Image: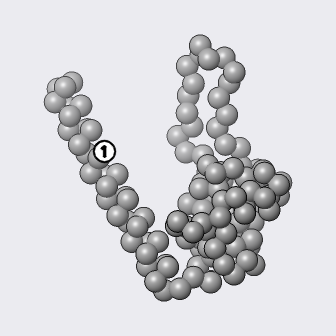
Amino acid sequence: MTSTFAPFAPSRDTTAQVELPLAAVPANTDVRWLEHLLQGAHCWLTAKDIAQTSMGRVGDRDLRALASASAWIISGQKGYKHVAHATTEEITHASNWLVSQGKLMIKRGLRIKRNAHRRIG
């Protein structure tokens, strides 16, 4: 896989302030590559399986970003799977988990904002 997705890589100068990108968006070709891989697999693939298939060019963070950019990939404790080969229960579980995590993140963000407002004014 020739990746056009360039994840954030900090400079070697540890004294410089590092600016994180606002959002690293993977290239559509990389997302399609992962979708095609999972569609052909017909089963769950672990991150390790995918790393081996890509000869180490796709790390855990890259893989999560690619899966997040796709509307066809579910993830869970077993790894990653294409929706075309997932059961209704697997799809429902993955979807419900993501929605639940989103709600928790929103609540946390609001608590932080509230406390910062109390502190700053």
Amino acid carrying label 1: it is Gly
Residue at the spot 64% in from the left edge and 38% down from the top edge: 8
Total labels: the figure holds 1
Which residue in the structure is indicated by mark 1? 109
Left or right: 10 as drawn, with respect to 112: right
Image quadrant where one finds the N terminus: bottom right
Estimate the x, y position of residue 11 in percent, counting from the top left: 68, 24
Q: Would residue 71 be seen by someone viewing this image from the given angle?
A: no
93 in relation to 5, above or below: below
Give 92 or 47, whichever is nearer the viewer: 47
Q: Would residue 51 be seen by someone viewing this image from the given angle?
A: yes
Quarter occupied by residue 19: top right
Residue at the spot 67% in from the left edge and 69% down from the top edge: 45
Residue at the spot 59% in from the left edge and 13% down from the top edge: 15
Asked which secondary structure carries label 1, the reply is helix
Give 43 or 5, whichever is nearer the viewer: 43
Image quadrant where one finds the C terminus: top left
Give 59 or 105, whichever is nearer the viewer: 59
Estimate the x, y position of residue 74 in percent, counting from the top left: 55, 70
Estimate the x, y position of residue 104 in percent, counting from the top left: 31, 55
The colour scheme used here is one colour
Residue at the spot 27% in from the left edge and 38% down from the top edge: 112
Estimate the x, y position of residue 4 in percent, counting from the top left: 76, 50
User: Pointer 1: residues within 10 angstroms few (<14), some, or many (20+)?
Assistant: few
120 in relation to 92, above or below: above
9 in relation to 31, above or below: above
Give 18 or 82, whichever is nearer the viewer: 82
Left or right: 121 as drawn, with respect to 16: left
Among all residues in the image, which is located at the extreme top? 15
